[in-house]
Amino acid sequence: MSKGGTAVLNEQGAARTKRGYFGPYGGRFVPEGIAVLLEELEKAFDEAVADPTFRKELDEVLVEFVGRPSPVTECRNLSRACGGGRLFLKREDLNHTGAHKINNALGQGLLAKRMGKKRLIAETGAGMHGTASATAAALLGMECVVYMGAVDVARQAPNVGRMRALGATVVPVSFGQATLKEAVDGALAAWMEDPEAFYLLGSAVGPSPYPEIVRFFQSVIGSEARTQMLQREGRLPDEVVACVGGGSNAIGIFSGFLADPQVAITGVEPAGKGLHLGLGAHAATLVAGSPGVVHGFNTYVLADDAGEPAPVYSIAPGLDYPGVGPEHAYLKDTGRVQYVAVTDEEAITAFGRLCREEGIIPAIESSHALAYALKRLPSMEKEQILLVNLSGRGDKDLDTLLPLLGL
Ligand SMILES: *Cc1c(COP(=O)(O)O)cnc(C)c1O
């Protein structure tokens, strides 16, 4: 254990300390106008979670619309090639819309409907959360407005098209770096102007209660995976691995195993062009950042000398955020989860190998978790099991990656 000792875990394995906090991280550092809305959201969330009708509605839509449970797949070819442990994947890439984001978008969409909201506001980076939100809005008969950095609008045209086809309005945000951080700023400003709308936040970040809400809707990944491993192998995996952008797919799968001390847990951040190149070359917030406040909550941040969020970079558009979910900040300090970083190059190599050696095209985000797994497997025993959360499918990344793979 590193500094901080053992995490205090409740019966769900949540590292929450007092409401809204994970150790010193989390909280609600927002203007009064937004604090009132967050209070109302927290109350509605608590009521929904306690209501069996809501849980039933959520379960039904996850089965019939998303296609849950997602399977667990053993990768025999790669395991053999690496030598050492056995590699398993939790297949969130097989969900409707192609990633884990739909779990949260539908959950929050149902919550919004229950609160009588008619309009969803969402931010998006690469467009995956925007697409999931637009999908939820279409299914639930709501209006959807998605804020997206102008730079991302230009480089993610297929997702912009998908959102429009699904009936959403995409609003380009042109200030600053014109990417994800500014999209969040734009969405928050829009919410303050239209408090009757529901802000559908896409990762386990933001002011309380969002990290808790997103964790709740993504924990289906971990609870399914836990049951599937016990059914298939009669035991838990030895190590569970996920990529960390804001941290929602990671906390989703980790939540199923945090309370099992025999399961090692690893979060993988983007080292981009290399950590040694310093700020601007990566987005490894936990590995290379320090505590600070961003977007209304306390966490690890990549900040410049003036304390402003620094420019971030990763080849994976879903991973380039200068903050990280507050629960991950706490799990790092307590030592329950180890956080590492892999470079673009390592992720690209892992992407190519999963395609050719297993017949699965992974998202470049998920390929970061795979890259760590490929390095780790050779040092594991033959019967040991390493479970990777395959957060999404990689069709969206082919235009970028094929030239880099010389194809
Ligand atoms: C958005 C995204 C991520 C990163 O977001 P988290 O909140 O860290 O999970 C990872 N993988 C895929 C496929 C994504 O679309």
Image (cartoon, rainbow, N blue to C red):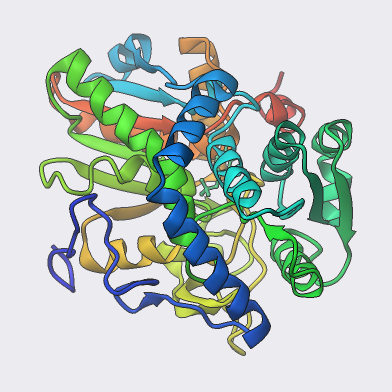
Q: Quadrant of residue 15?
A: bottom left
Percent x, y of residue 280: 64, 66
Q: Quadrant of residue 72?
A: top left
| Residue at 77 percent of width and 34 percent of height | 138
Depth check: give the residue in front, 197 or 275: 197
As drawn, 403 above or below 345? above
| Residue at 56 percent of width and 69 percent of height | 40
Q: On the rendered image, what quadrant is the C terminus found in?
A: top right
Q: On the rendered image, what quadrant is the N terminus found in?
A: bottom left
Depth check: give the residue in front, 154 or 9: 9
Relative side of 162 to 401, left or right:
right
Relative side of 117 to 389, left or right:
right
Asked whether the viewer can see residue 214, the reply is yes
Percent x, y of residue 317: 66, 47
Count of marks placed on residues: 0
| Residue at 41 percent of width and 46 percent of height | 51
As drawn, 306 above or below 22? below
| Residue at 37 percent of width and 52 percent of height | 340
- Give the quadrant of ligand 1: top right
Asked whether the viewer can see residue 318, the reply is no
Depth check: give the residue in front, 80 or 316: 316
Percent x, y of residue 123: 72, 56
As drawn, 219 above or below 146? above
As drawn, 138 above or below 317? above
Percent x, y of residue 149: 81, 58
